[in-house]
Image (cartoon, rainbow, N blue to C red):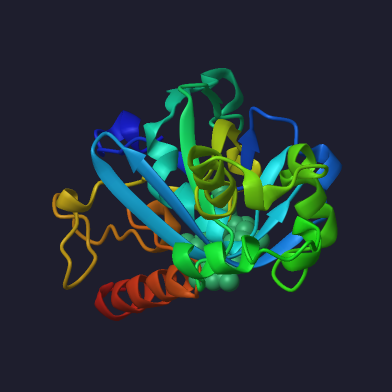
Amino acid sequence: MLAKKGIQITQLYPSLVSIETIYDYSNLSGISIKNVSVRANIDGKKYLTSGDMLFTQKGLSGPAIIDMSSYIVKFQDLKTDTSSNHKNLTYKGKNLEISIDFMPDISKNQLEDIIFDSSKKALKTKLSAYLPERMLKFLFEKYEDKDINNIKKEEKEKLLNILKNYKIAIKNFSNIKSAIVTKGGVSLNQISPSTIQFKNIQNLYFAGECLDIDALTGGYNLQIAFSTVYLAGNNAKL
Ligand SMILES: Cc1cc2nc3c(=O)[nH]c(=O)nc-3n(C[C@H](O)[C@H](O)[C@H](O)COP(=O)(O)OP(=O)(O)OC[C@H]3O[C@@H](n4cnc5c(N)ncnc54)[C@H](O)[C@@H]3O)c2cc1C
């Protein structure tokens, strides 16, 4: 409706959403991992988030993942189903990749000492204090019967990277119905920042999520809504 009135609306994306993965992780569904780091390197820019993550039926969720969605969702090609009034925005898959450090508080050298400690203990026993057993079983299935102290240097590096640089290809992002916030909205260059009034139409104010402002999790989106509506309320002339 606003676009038809000549009001500029930027591209809309669902933000703070779960990620659907190409690989089927449904066997791990329900496993939650505390305090991971998530990285993405896209078009020469680096993004980093941290916090807990969760495996779901379709892929990944949890604070570290949904925060990352806020940075990278815009790199997907948008396919808009205009017949349904913007209720069914979906994405066609430009494949993106994230990398997960399951143990960001432990350096690669420290991890090397933990894993290759020359004891005969199983890998999953050595790491049992750090990750859930089901997760370790999944990650290190192919090493179950191997004497890991006698593997080649490159193989050791691969093994460390499973924990420090685990790559996951993205298939899609959850749709706008399940998004915590919408990225995009009424373009800010048409809004006076001190009054939040639309510059070209007197007494027209936009506040909250319909503006092209959004943030990571942590209360910032509510703060945006409260602050902008406060300005609109104070400046509106009745
Ligand atoms: C599950 C969930 C969890 C969230 N958690 C957090 C959080 O922890 N911290 C945080 O900062 N943010 C969080 N958010 C985001 C935050 O809630 C929103 O950014 C914020 O509420 C936006 O405020 P708003 O007033 O702009 O929009 P809304 O809160 O969406 O309010 C818009 C209102 O307009 C009404 N409306 C819509 N169309 C019409 C119409 N045609 N006529 C009349 N009324 C209409 C709607 O019913 C609604 O009440 C969360 C969002 C979700 C969905």
Q: Nearer the viewer, residue 200 or 122?
A: 122
Q: Residue at x 30, y 49 (%)?
A: 46
Q: Residue at x 42, y 76 (%)?
A: 223
- Residue 215 rendering spot, x and y as whole percentages: 40, 62
Q: Nearer the viewer, residue 152 or 234?
A: 152
- Residue 82 rendering spot, x and y as whole percentages: 52, 21
With 82 as the anchor, is 199 left or right in this view? left
- Residue 201 rendering spot, x and y as whole percentages: 19, 51
With 132 as the anchor, is 35 left or right in this view? left
Q: Residue at x 80, y 65 (%)?
A: 125
Q: Residue at x 29, y 81 (%)?
A: 234
With 30 as the anchor, is 115 left or right in this view? left
- Is residue 16 among the parts visible in the rendering? no
Q: Is residue 218 above or below residue 197?
A: below
With 9 as the anchor, is 122 left or right in this view? right
Where is the C terminus found, in terms of image quarters?
A: bottom left
- Residue 38 rendering spot, x and y as whole percentages: 49, 55
- Is residue 79 among the parts visible in the rendering? yes
Q: Nearer the viewer, residue 147 or 99?
A: 147
Q: Examine the image and state in which quarter residue 220 appears.
A: bottom left
Where is the N terminus found, in terms of image quarters?
A: top left
- Ligand 1 shows up in the quarter that is bottom right
